Amino acid sequence: MNNPRQLKINILRYNPQLPDNKPRMQQYEIDEAENMTLFIVLNELREQQDPSLQFDFVCRAGICGSCAMLVNGQPGLACRTLTTSLDSEITLAPLPVFELIADLSVNTGKWMRTMSERMEAWIHGDEEERDIRQMEAPMDPDEADAIYELERCIECGCCVAACGTARMRDDFVGAVAINKLARFRLDPRDKRTDQDFYELIGTDEGVFGCMSLLACNDFCPKELPLQTQIAFLRRKMLKSGLQRRD
Amino acid sequence: MKIIYTDVLVIGGGLAGLRTAIGAKRRGHDAIILSLVPPKRSHSAAAQGGMQASLANSAKGDGDNEDVHFEDTVRGSDWGADQDVVRMFVNTAPKAIRELANWGVPWNRVRRGDHDVIINGKKVTLTEEDDSHGMITARDFGGTKKWRTCYVSDGTGHSMLYNMSDQAIARNIPVHERVEAVRLIHDGARCCGAVVRNLITGELISYIARATCLATGGFGRIYRSTTNAVINEGMGAAIALETGAAALGNMEAVQFHPTAIFPAGILVTEGCRGDGGLLLDADQHRFMPDYEPEKRELASRDVVSRRMEEHIAKGKAVQTRFGRHLWLDIRLLGRAHIEKNLREVNEICRYFLGIDPAEELIPVRPAQHYSMGGVRTDHTGQSPTLKGLFACGEAACWDMHGFNRLGGNSVAETVVAGMIVGEYIADFCDSPESEITISTAVARGFWEEERTHIDGLLSGGGDESSVAILAEMQNVMTDKVGIFRDGETLAQAVDELTELRKRARNIGVKTQSLGANPELVAAYRVRRMLKLAICVAYGALQRTESRGAHFRNDFSERNDRDWLKRTLATWPDNDSTLPDLDYEALDIMRMELPPGSRGYGGADHINHPDSAKRQAEVDSIRSNADNEDRFAAQAAILPFDHLLPKILRGRNARPGEPVQ
């Protein structure tokens, strides 16, 4: 790279574990390199300038969802964000909504587990499982593809961090949960009915809490069809709710 | 010292650990899973291309069965694998796929009728039967005779991990996230848990368990250039090694994947080549058929990686300022196929390389990918030398991959091993053998040792940097213990690593926080990683032959006469500079497939005298057997059903082979 840019990286620093620590912005400078991602930037800063800097990376390939953070105010995956796509001054902050561990590291895992338990987000199959010595049950190839389409969620938390409702009420389940239930609802192996799903999500903390701002859809790194799923599930749940009244 | 008691302590929340815990819990034992990260972030999610199981549903899988999968796996291993374990594995893999289908994995399914596919660079039309419509389909992978790799687009590991993890949640299995096991608690003969550090608060807690299972994955991060996630630092294997009692098997057997994107090292799946992608050189010449006329791009990974490096050494690589690379060409598969079946590859190319793989070539070069070696166990997953310690998945060496693993056999192994080892752990916990008689004072001893270790790093005032030592270790491993090895360079590597280990005694930590402190974590981990690196380099130096992924320029033949044996490394004394190496012979007279030629890779081998003898025995059993019943001859040659847990015994139904 001829004449590399000098990047100014502003990071919101705060470690609640340390008694006298207060939130503050800290600025670092670093020379831009070719194909530089925020994964490379943050690791270089930690290795060469500030060994106390906290952040989370696991796969560094955009598939595990560990490294979601606010990049210039917008949620995204740091590992696959190229610095060339940003101005030379970059501001990084932890995702809101989730419990802060320190600096850019937040506890998405704890939030997601709680959500999964609340939403019973797993296949509710037959009482007796199919014998695994026998041939598997056939499934329509298009149906399998459609399920995978929704299963591509990586629980990174971007949709929750971007969500207006989640910012106002901390019991809102978020697009991640709505998408998951849409995935199980689509799956013929899941024996739950719409009435069962209504019990889980037919509430203000659930699908009726969504204000349709739809930043979830705009910021999903996996480009999941969240807008469609929320609208679809809301219609189905409304129908179930009305049926219950009858 | 806080103590948490449980029946089964599973260390690692990837596919192997989750399935083991589910197995133990199903049998009525409490299990706790420890994980460095939320389980769905585990490296299992990175398995893209698929999982091998001989379902034989698709046209190109016709005629596949356990026997074919067995032979492919043993040849792939270059006869280093334990054939009993391979038999157990190939018989359980179809059950694992079907269990995962019950649990929600949306396996891609066969579509009836004609399909155009790319085989050997040419368009071919395949026709799928009406009867197969909707059954689980499979794609081609390297080193296999049939299309056997079942898949979910190229997010197979992701889909498996999510559904498995959801099952663990459904069964109410607690996962203690963001914690790290730093010592195993043991008395030299019996393991009964671990000292565990909370990575958020820094608290050290002792977990005491009747059975402890390491499912911590591989140790790819001892290399500079690796496809592994940043958490794959081998800490499970390292703490097992530090017991001095448990052994690590075949640590020198390290796999390099042919297609890591250059220079970032991010994996693009073998499915690219399985689906018809080609490898090209700087002149855009397809070079693999020149080296491997039979299997071409789809020889086993060790062979393809070696051929690529050989071709690069001949000056046929593309030169860039970061170094040299070759090309992967998937343009011929077409945009529709790439966007449906290779969508992670498509995303990786878009985000990390800024290219469109339907129009442009992908720069690739081999990078470290998989650790065949690991904690040595028997076929039940238990350490033969440290009772109560189990291991499974990539962390273990039980040993089904020998010196080279086939693509698609690792996610398969994680689940299969979890199913088998979970049952055996439950059996162990049901038996009086599992009673713990060790005093909590033993736990306190290890707890205090670790406390002292960490305090020493924080207050010792050392002036060495863990970052610098880590980088130097990774350079030594990639430059000197890589794809091509020789005695002189390996000896240098051992010396340099030993020197780094001396320097690592003097590591200083500037950040004085007991809690979340990445600098402290790097400091204690690099000391343990160095021990693993020395086991790999020293094992490679001693093994004066070439087998699978271990290739010696100065001993280029496989030598069954002298080296058909498994390396066992132990490190009883922390102050000694090298591990103790011991060797365990593989018994040819028990083999179903005695050593012979792999059919690819070109290299010759030195025969063991027993090979011909056993081959004659096997041939004679086969010629006397009933040709109609493939199971009878197999059972006469290598009976294995009794080695499996009762609920996993029995045949697998497939088209034309029903099971009553």
Image (spheres, coloured by chain):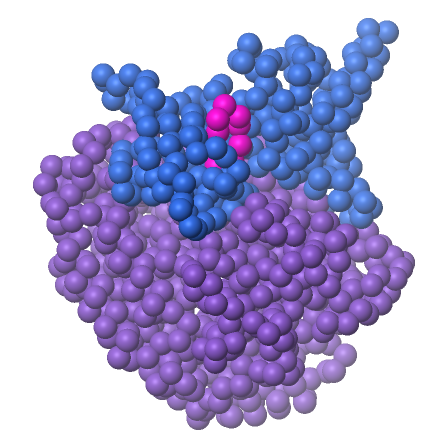
Chain colours: A blue, B purple
Left or right: B176, with B510 as reference point: right
Based on the displayed image, in which of its 4 quarters is residue A235 positioned?
Answer: top right
User: Could you tell me residue A150's position as x and y percent?
Assistant: 69, 36
Quarter of the image for the C terminus of chain B: give it.
bottom right
How many numbered discs? 0
Residue drawn at (82%, 70%) of the image: B124
Q: Is residue B333 visible?
A: yes
Q: Nearer the viewer, residue A149 or B290?
A: B290
Residue drawn at (67%, 24%) of the image: A178
User: Could you tell me residue A73's position as x and y percent?
Assistant: 50, 23
Quarter of the image for the N terminus of chain B: give it.
top left
Left or right: B577, with B629 as reference point: left
User: Could you tell me residue B199's position as x and y percent?
Assistant: 32, 34
In the depicted structure, whether residue B497 falls above or below residue A185: below
Q: Nearer the viewer, residue B369 or B393?
A: B369
**The residue stretch that appears in magenta:** A71-79
Left or right: B251, with B92 as reference point: left
Residue drawn at (62%, 61%) of the image: B361
Q: Nearer the viewer, residue B537 or A29?
A: A29
In the depicted structure, whether residue B594 falls above or below residue A187: below
Q: Is residue B35 visible?
A: no
Look at the image and say whether residue B379 sits in the magenta stretch. Answer: no
Residue drawn at (47%, 54%) of the image: B264
Left or right: B116, with B445 as reference point: right
Q: Nearer the viewer, residue B540 or A40?
A: A40
